[in-house]
Amino acid sequence: MTTVLITGANRGLGLEFARQYAADGWKVVGCCRDPDKADALKKITGVQIEALETGDEKSIAALAAKLKDTPIDLLINNAGIYSGANGTLGNDASQTFGTINGEAWDKVLRVNTIAPILVTQALLPNLQKGAGKKIVNITSRMGSLTEMGAGSVAYRSSKTALNGAMRVIMHDLQNMGLSIYNFHPGWVQTDMGGKGAHLTPEQSITAMRATISKLTAKDSGHYLNYDGQIIPW
Ligand SMILES: NC(=O)c1ccc[n+]([C@@H]2O[C@H](COP(=O)([O-])OP(=O)(O)OC[C@H]3O[C@@H](n4cnc5c(N)ncnc54)[C@H](OP(=O)(O)O)[C@@H]3O)[C@@H](O)[C@H]2O)c1
């Protein structure tokens, strides 16, 4: 059976990834910070729910130890935060120039940039055992240097840095027979994206899954829109 491991699978895009892959007959390992409260994830038949706080290296190590012999075909590093201070898009003084809060920025970098790379590193033996050999990071178009706008400095820079880190480790992964891709999911109606966003989670994830299924090793290192279009760095 094909296995996907998804971080941040209890709500938003991660939950929809879990729903769609499970419905398609995949084995889904759905990771979340608090399995006891993952009610929506528990309702999906056949999901193996695991605890993972991606910002905590001990939690990452515990997950890797638990999954020791489990092959993983596809790793989706989805978990992410917009703000390190509970701010929302357009309303976050902690990442507005003039009132930037360094501690809050640290938290965003830990979860959005460093954690996906550490999770990937910890699960390398599992990915090498799987047949799929694919890693997907959910980044954002807000991290594109070419398209860079104002505001959200912590969030934007965390995704730019994730794109950069992906371009570094893609070379190491290639030597191990693994491919990695960074995806912008579109502007999606989740807690992070808000109700006014362009896409429903179902639309975004349906398109991303179709794109992921077509990607080959030759595409490794690409920065892609959910529909497969290349995004300028
Ligand atoms: N929605 C959009 O329009 C949009 C656009 C571009 C990129 N993205 C990216 O897409 C990804 C998913 O976003 P979303 O829209 O689904 O956001 P969301 O609705 O806010 O959900 C975020 C998910 O990440 C989890 N998470 C956050 N910090 C975590 C941590 N330290 N450890 C483990 N899990 C953690 C959350 O778990 P808890 O429930 O425990 O908090 C939740 O499951 C993010 O990387 C985001 O940056 C979203």
Image: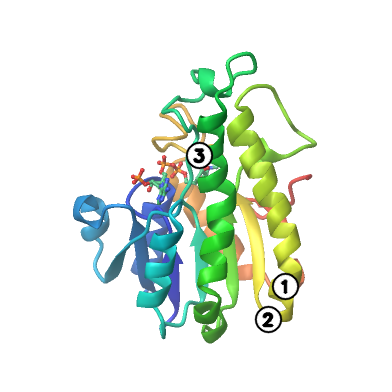
Amino acid at circle 2: Met
Q: Front-most of 155 and 85?
A: 85
Q: Which mark is residue 176?
A: 2
Identify the residue under disc 1.
172
- Image location of residue 112, percent across then percent down: 55, 46
Q: CA distance from mark 3 to mark 1?
A: 26 Å
Amino acid at circle 1: Asp
Amino acid at circle 3: Lys
Q: CA distance from mark 3 to mark 2?
A: 30 Å
Which residue is found at the position 52% from the left and 34% from the top?
Answer: 198
State the residue lying farthest toward the top: 98
Q: Is residue 171 above or below residue 100?
A: below
Q: Is residue 40 above or below residue 179?
A: above
Residue 124 showing in the rendered view? yes
Q: Secondary structure at mark 1?
A: helix
Dot 3, crowdedness within 10 Å: few (<14), some or many (≥20)?
Answer: some
Dot 1, crowdedness within 10 Å: few (<14), some or many (≥20)?
Answer: few
Q: Which mark is residue 107?
A: 3
- Image location of residue 90, percent across then percent down: 53, 19
Which residue is found at the position 62% from the left and 41% from the top?
Answer: 158
Q: Secondary structure at mark 3?
A: helix
Instruction: Tell us which disc is closer to us: 3 or 1.
Output: 3
Q: Front-most of 181 and 105?
A: 105
Pointers 2 and 1 in contact (CB under 8 A)? Answer: yes
Among the two numbered marks 3 and 1 on one chain, the one whose residue lies closer to the N terminus = 3
Mark 3: is the Cβ under 8 angstroms from ligand 1? Answer: no
Among the 4 quarters of the image, the one containing residue 169 = bottom right
- Image location of residue 188, percent across then percent down: 49, 39
Numbered marks: total: 3
